[in-house]
């Protein structure tokens, strides 16, 4: 199933929160992203229906295998693109904001080329 950019942003947020905390609820996403409770509730429902997350009876959110894979891919892109931009002289805040936009639109082919370049450069 395909997912829109906003869904990818929610998945990445859930991934980041789960890396820092043992559990995540919708209110944690609200606090992290600064979105309204209804917006987060709608997104959580869409992600659940899409098979990207599971929500237990107490409201705790977990990533499915498919959700975790996609979230990690997005997060890794964000991290690599931020680092690349910083290495080019962009300040960290701007680099992170720009990477957030780029991570959703860059093709796998272009991202893999960037990774090959960075790996060759580090050897």
Image (cartoon, helix red, strand yellow):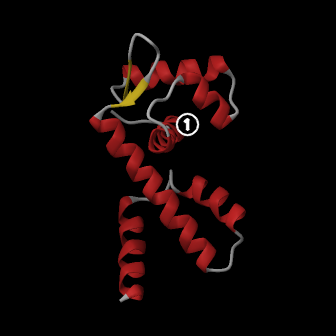
Q: Measured from the top left, where is residue 52 in percent x and y?
A: 36, 30
Figure quadrant of residue 15 = top left
Q: From the viewer's perspective, is 54 left or right of 82?
A: left
Quadrant of image for the N terminus:
top left
Residue at point 60%, 53% (across, down):
101
Viewer-closest of 66 and 110: 66
In the image, is residue 15 above or below residue 75?
above
* Residue at disc 1, secondary structure: helix
Whether 46 is drawn above or below 84: the answer is: above
Between 25 and 43, the one nearer to me in the picture = 25
Q: Is residue 13 above or below residue 98?
A: above
Q: Which residue appears at 59% of the width and 53% of the height?
A: 100
Residue at point 38%, 29% (across, down):
62
Where is mark 1, residue-wise? 6
Q: Quadrant of the C terminus?
A: bottom left
Q: Position of residue 45 (x, y in %)?
A: 47, 18
> Where 99 sits versus 57, above or below?
below
- Residue beneath the point at 46% across and 22% down: 46
């Amino acid at each position: 199933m395909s997912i829109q950019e906003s869904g990818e942003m929610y998945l990445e947020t859930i991934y980041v929160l789960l890396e820092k905390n043992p559990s995540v609820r919708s209110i944690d996403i609200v606090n992290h992203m600064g979105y309204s409770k209804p917006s987060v509730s709608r997104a959580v429902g869409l992600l659940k229906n899409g098979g990207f997350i599971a929500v237990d009876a107490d409201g705790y959110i977990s990533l499915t295998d498919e959700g975790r894979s996609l979230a990690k891919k997005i997060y890794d892109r964000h991290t690599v693109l931020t680092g690349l931009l910083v290495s080019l002289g962009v300040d960290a805040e701007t680099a992170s904001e720009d990477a957030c936009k780029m991570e959703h639109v860059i093709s796998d082919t272009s991202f893999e080329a960037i990774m090959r370049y960075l790996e060759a450069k580090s050897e």
